[in-house]
Image (cartoon, grey):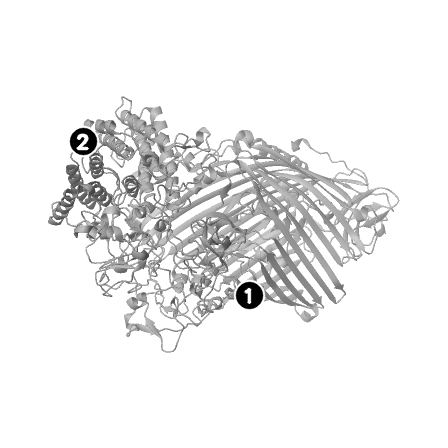
Amino acid sequence: MKIKLKYIIPVMFVLITSSCKKNLDINHDPDNPTSLPISKILPTVERDLGLALSMGTSWTNDYGNPSGGLGMELETYVHRTTQRGTPPDQYTVSGTDFYMQAGWTDMYGLVLNNVERIIADGTAAGNMQYVGIAKIIKAYAFSQLADIFGDIPFSEANKLKGGNTAPKFDDDATIYPKLFALLDEGIANLSAAATNALKPGNDDVIYKGSIANWTKAANTIKLKLYTQERLVKNVSAEVNALITANNLIGSTAQGFMMPFGSSVSPDDRNPGEREYFASQRTIDISPWFYETMKGINQFMPGTGNLNNPDPRIPYYFFNQIKVGQVAPNDANQTEYRDGSFVSIYFGTTGPDAGRSQQNSLTTLGMYPSGGRYDDGQGRGTGLNQNSATGAAPYRFITYADRLYLEAELIKAGVIAGDARAKLLAAINESFKQVDFVVNLAKGSQTPPVLVGSAAVTTYINNVMAAYDADPTKQLQIIMTQKWISSFGNGIDAYTDYRRTRFPIIFDPNDPVMAPNHFVQPPINGDPVNPGAQKPVPVQTSLPYPLSIPWPTVELDVNSNAPAQKNPSTYKPFWLQ
Amino acid sequence: MLCSHVLILMAQNRVITGKIAAADGKAVSFATVTIKGTSTAVSADENGFFSIQAPPNAVLVVSAAGFQSTELNIGTQQSINVSLTNSGTLAEVVVTTALGIRRSDKALGYSITKVDPNALVQKSEPDLLKSLQGQVAGVDIRTSQGTPGAATRIQIRGNSSFFSDNQPLIIVDGVPFSNDQVTTSSQTSGGGAYGSGIADLDPNDIASMNVLKGSSAAALYGSRASNGVIIVTTKSGSVSRSRKGMEVNLKSSVSFETIANLPKYQNDFGTGSQGVLGGGSNGSWGKHFAAGDSQAVWADYLRAYPELFPTGKVAYQAHPDNISSQFRTGVVYENSIGFNGGDEKSSFSLTASELNHKGYVPNSNFNRSNLSLGGSTKLGIGVNVRANFSYSRSDQSGGIFGENQTSGVIASSEFARSLFLGRSWDMTLPYEDKLGNSIAFISGGFDNAFWSYKYNTSKTFEEREIAGLHFDFNLAKWAKIDYNVGTNINTLDRTEIQEVSTRGSSPGFIRLDHYRKQEIESTLLLSLTPKITNDITVRATFGTSYNQRTSNRLANEGDAFIVRGTHNITNTATQLILASAYSRRRLVGVFGDVTLGYKNWAFVTATGRNDWSSTLPIENRSYFYPSVSGSLVFTDALKIHSNIIDFGKIRGGWAKVGRDAAPYQLEDVFGILTNFVGQSRGTLPNQANNPSIKPEFTREYEAGTQLSFLKRKIEVDFTWYDKLSTNLIAPISTPLSTGYASLFSNFGSISNKGIEAELTIRPIKTANLSWEVKGIFTKNKNIVESLTVGVPRIFLGGGFNTYAPYLEAGKPYGFIRGIKALRDSSTGQFLINPADGTLIKSTAFEQIGDPNPDYKLGISTTINYKGFFLYGLFDMTKGGDIYSVTVQSLLGRGVTLDTRDRETGWVIPGVYGDPNTGKAILSGGKTIPNQTRITTNDLYFAPTGGSTFGINTASEMSVYDATVYRLRELAIGYNIPKSAFKKLPIGSATITVTGRNLWFLAPGFPKYTNFDPEVNTYGATNVQGFEFSAAPTSKRIGVNLNVTF
């Protein structure tokens, strides 16, 4: 027996080691697939494009990391929102800004890296409709990044698998022509003769597989980009060609928009609606924007200076408290109050700016984020994710935007036409667009229809009268109306402002807007404390930023990246 | 292969066998037995057994270090027992080395610390690792939260990889013991005080514990040994035949714990700002209390209980006890019973223990039950068989921690305000409204602490089973085979609940985490001790091992409770899957270890191991690594027989250790995502994998000496080491414009250089009185030597935008990078903003702290007088920085005495600077001294846009030097003499009174914050040096009783 065992154990030993090879071939992840149909990638690309450009506050992205949108800070830069003590409040968005870094990450990773996969797999399999959509999205995504940041990685981007670990930054002037070419390729791919064994349908959450709408969207993106180039290039021929071909976005429903849903889990809501259940609400409505729409902002021809109130106010903003209600937290200690509207100023250093107005500040309404229509009843501490649906779309480019672009082009002399008629059409379409969003997002609320109402007609007539009255203010009125209409898309508003310097925005250093660096909130604005509210000290020491610093996370690890820019002097190429 | 080494046993005539023991009956290991007048000699084994061929009537000379040499005439006896007399010099020490090979300390070319198992039990410290603090040179042990069951981090000779687990491999009875910390929710913005696996181990069942610090010692363990190895042998896993028949050991202890460090609070000012009462403020910067003052009732209270406040006013007064009254006196009960018995052939051991630990924080508990059983027998066929099984179960419950003030992330931490409540807040008011919603003094700012303790909970139930089987038999006198196979399975089930109305998630949620890990290891060893010559000894071990690790995890979240109070995932409106993961890896190794000895004073050991890992690409799967070490007992070699120096040894070694990757890191996989507007979808990952990973290697030099002076009155053990880990396997950060955040690759290197020293002094040693003082010293410098071209630094994990840990070439591992206040470039003085008199923050990021301590020192003293003994352990950590949200908040909220002096204004020493240029403002070429006064309020809670020293500041201002001095343990005990139990069957009894953490001093912190830096938010992970409103440490006083029957 002893002898036997003596031999058994060495034999066991040999068995153990000789079965090595088979034993060790177990390194294939059983939980995650190594391939994925492009129809499962497209909805991710589209969704994440919408999220990455939005003004939503922090959510968890598709990599499982906290994320935010590129529009968040830019809405404050265009003075439609303010944020308490955060970088955009003083024009100090830096390379480490959370939203800009998150947006950059999601654009290059979730959107563009996946887009390249759709292009590669779709081309290989002859599914050219997917390829066309992917190229249009790619061109649009890069155009947004170039407009925000100027030079960006383009020609060498998303090539890690090809061995490029340090993409160079291309001159944005050289990127634009390639984007037009890419859009043309995309349009051609959409209708190319190909096997198209797999065609986009509901997985294309933007247009449900409509090749016609994607073609219109691509052409309208071209129109927008030509308009943005108009200061540095004669784009008349290109624009006229587009107008003549007449294959642009031509109705509200054809708008290039990312539809969000109302499902809480999995969450498919507009990220702006997160403000309704955030433990710390971070977005205030800019008093400058509010006073413009209220009709009391003297710097706004056609609206604010005419006491011409905008009927869209209750669709744009939601007041948590009622007119006469004491703010739930710190009674009497709001910085800016006008009836039920509570907010803080851009650039404030006032003593009341830091107070928590969690349950009293005015927040985003139904139009920008799928929030709540303001029926004047307040919500006190009852505002939460059940108060609204979140089902408002993110509007990349709408029919109204197209009309404003045409009005601007005519007014600027790039093309011939009737600028007044285009503006009127654009304003009408802007109201229609609000009704369109309300229909998607109203849930159990029943807000009145805007189009056709007397208030809307009066408002539009007043604007047009102002337009007719002073030809020197016509471009300003066009851009101001576009600025009001595009609430929610801060990126294009930022580009429009840099190009046209309209609308006029709040400047804490302007002696008229803020005499001695103080602004006066509305007299008798606080019903709880009648009389004058405390004047608020405001400041900013930086000039208006002409572009946004590149994210430090990119510069830190990219040996081909340029040195960080000075945002006050670094211009996108189309501003030269 | 080894199987070709089939050995033939040659029978011999006239073999004398015997056992060598000391006067007290304990075996003397590795004594030298020589036949007088010849050169024939053998070495006894570790248990004192020897066998030698000798002619009749030969005289044996038996010698061993620490004993007087003895001569015996064997006559015609076949077997003989030898008793040696202690010479008062250093005795031969036997230690367990890699793979359980036991050998003489003399022969070791590297440093191993043997831990006395008695040091681990019954000292009012339920955590095994914490009871090692200050006791072992070269080991850095750090705690996390001060609540029961929270993880403890142990580290030997620093971090040697970027992101992998840098804790040592723990081997229990030959099988690796997983010490994972399962993290369910991010500990940055929530998450519990998670424990780690080692908490399952019963300290009462430990028979021995050996710490293998360097690569030389650990090389045979291969891939996982680059961070050192802790070898634990349990009583049940090592049953040895008892001399007495049956022994029963009973241990019982009870100790009481309280919070160790409450700050000293001011009770002169209530909430508000700038001396003005403000009921809605967080900070106690309001009006000075005065008789008759009143304030408006806090909004949430008035809304919830209008009937309690008919006037709408409450007194504006101090509530001095509103913080201390939150905490209770905790208690730790520990009871254990052990049986050990048997006869010449068979034996068994049984240990059963029960631990109940109730923490000082309400609703924080840790309970553990262990049962361990082992048996051994010698089969008739000459094979020894040993088997053991142990089962443990533990329950941990506690609250949710993290940083409450996280922008963008919704957080609800139970310590959000617990230590810095407004001084005028009345915590005796109800903590919930009539529906059960949390109510607090600031709407939406934080949850009421009492409400959190009750409703926001993290509960973890863990079970572990260990089973092992061991065979050994002698092929010949000089050849032995050992086979060990075992499995170690742990299963963790966690339930995390945040109740309806919590700040972080008002509809509430539940997270369920199920994790199971199984590890199987089998090891076959052939040990050879052939006789070469009398002077030259050979010990050789060859073997193979097989290891398989499998883990499964399934975690789910249910959001929005439908009915409050029923915490089941079926009672939630929506559910999602957080994780569903499986992984398996295998590792096969073949190794050899050969030691050559010369005259028992010079030894050289060479080892080699080849591994085949399933996690590496086929072409790189096999990798080999060697080690060489040597030792020289120069006192024997030079025949020094001095009374001054009685033992001296020098040792040195070089080793290389390879390490494989984590599973599934070679091919890219897609992530499957949740539906979006009804569409199923997925994405490319954000980490690009790499199909050509190679193993990473650590090479280490070490040298040391052991010296004993004045008949062991002074003993010194000193080690120097230099460790370099290269070609590390880790995700390298890539520019996001590549489409990926990281590329899994081989790159970079990390070095650890340091010294470990132990000094033992025994000034008095008489029959009745002995006094021993022992000092241990640990110094390690852990530097990231290189990353890769174009990547200056890598984010390590955790932290926040303006303060986070990084890896950067030339900098300490995990240094804290953040924002500094600007200084004047010529004088180094602060630049002050003339507009508001506050500091000017830099926009650049730089190093603001290093969490690695400069050195650690432990000094213990033991005095024995007759049956009484006194033990004291003092330890200190010098340096190492911590970012403390607690200290930042104590100052910023104006609650401690540090901020009481507020009648005068303050001028921050500095010169005026321009916030836009970041340069000093010059007047006539000279800087202008700051003369702008600010209030105490502004000094600690900066005005909007400004930056000072508490809240709203450059992140460097919240980083503090974590140097701490501590009286870790004080114990007084009495060994009740046997004579006291004449009529009782009691063998011995000891009663001890112990105190833990009775005193500490952390001079780097503001005086009245009384902050103990021995807390850490990220538990047993690589991220150290951050404290986000953690639960403070506790102190305990207890009574322990130990009885043997």
The answer to whether residue B106 is visible is yes
The amino acid type, in three-letter code, at marker 2 is Ala
Where residue A470 sits: x, y (%)?
17, 43
**Observer-nearest residue: B423 or B91?**
B423
Q: Please state which of residues B625 and B1032 is positioned toward the viewer in this rendering.
A: B1032
Judged from the image, the secondary structure of the residue bearing numbered disc 1 is: strand
Rendered-image quadrant of the N terminus of chain A: top right
Identify the residue at the far right of this view: B37
Q: Which residue is mark 2?
A: A416
Whether the residues at callouts 1 and 2 have beta carbons within 8 Å, the answer is no
Marked residue chain, label 1: B
Residue A116 horizontal/vertical position (percent): 37, 31
Return the x and y of residue A148 as percentages of the image width and height.
Answer: 34, 39
| Vertical placement of residue B503 versus A6, above or below | below
Q: Nearer the viewer, residue B928 or A88?
A: B928
Q: Is residue B637 left or right of residue A574?
A: right
Is residue B194 visible in the rendered image? The answer is no
Within 10 Å of disc 2 (Cα), the crowding (few <14, some 14-19, many 20+) is: some
Q: Nearer the viewer, mark 1 or mark 2?
A: 2
Q: Chain of mark 2?
A: A
Q: Amino acid at mark 1?
A: Arg
Left or right? Give the position of B770 relative to A109: right
- What is the number of the mark on residue B1036? 1
Of B933 and B127, nearer the camera is: B933
Secondary structure at badge 2 equals loop
Location of residue A469 with respect to B496 vertically, above or below: above
| Distance from Cα at disc 1 to Cα at disc 2 | 87 Å
